[in-house]
Image (cartoon, rainbow, N blue to C red):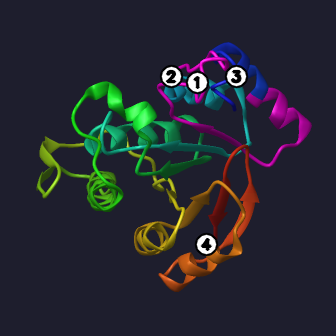
Amino acid sequence: MMCEHAGPNQLVRDAALAEQAGFDFAVISDHHFPWMEAQGQSPYAWSVLGAAAQATHHIPLTYVTCPIRRYHPAVVAQKPATMQLLSDGRFTLGLGAGENLNEHIVGGQWPPAPVRHEMLAEAVEIIRALWAGGTVTHRGRHFDVESAKVWDLPDAAPPIGIAVSGPASCRLAGRHAAAMIAVEPRAGLGRMFDAAGGSGGTVASSGYVIMRP
């Protein structure tokens, strides 16, 4: 679901047509900007996904977002919980450390990769705590959460994948996720992910390869 190339209505139609044509899954990434101005599109992907969940019946839906700058992880926790309900359990949440292209809009200095990895690990901790139910208060190195709760939770939480590009991110994904997401099917990334505790096979996607059990 190439949100850089199409508007929201077409993306929803594309997802429904992909299901009819027998595609294995649909995936969309959360960009505030297209990669190039010539692409000319960037609708709000969470809204597109909600509509796609209602326009389809069985195709799995996958989403990749950054939970450390534009969105606080407590806000991110609510979004996939709702998507899992709307899709009747067809949703997979992909998380990454983000690109400045999309995250700069909220201002502030763009953190280096090691700091973003710390932030991502803490964000996953917060998201999972909120998915467990109850009220969460968190005082962390990078994030605070004050008496937060996700009221509408699915029976089974969505699987979490983490974007990888090298050894550090593979270790992070292996420790904190059930899946890895990469921009190319490099076998070495899978081996590093497995060595850090992850395991799985590959599912090709538009711009990503998703590794999952």
Q: Residues within 10 Å of mark 2 (few under 14, many from 20)?
A: some
The residue that disc 3 covers is 5
> Label 2, label 4: how many angstroms apart (C-alpha)?
30 Å
- Residue at horizontal 55%, vertical 19%? 43
Q: Tell me which label, 3 or 4, sits earlier in the chain.
A: 3
User: Badge 4, how many Cα within 10 Å: few under 14, some, many 20+?
Assistant: many
Tell me the distance, in whole angstroms, between the alpha carbons under discs 3 and 4. 29 Å
The magenta stretch is 15-43
Left or right of 120 in this view: 138: left
* Whole-percent x, y for residue 149 in the image: 22, 43
Q: Going by the picture, which residue comes out furthest to the right?
A: 21
Q: Position of residue 16 (x, y in %)?
A: 78, 28
Q: As shown in the figure, which amino acid type bears the numbered disc 4? A: Leu
Q: Are marks 2 and 4 in contact (CB under 8 Å)?
A: no
Q: Are marks 1 and 2 in contact (CB under 8 Å)?
A: yes
Asked if the magenta segment contains residue 170, the reply would be no
Mark 4 sits on what residue? 189
- Residue identified by numbered label 1: 48
* Quadrant location of the C terminus in the rendered image: bottom right
Q: Secondary structure at mark 1?
A: helix
Q: Which sits in the foreground, 115 or 145?
A: 115
Mark 4 → mark 1, Cα distance in angstroms? 30 Å
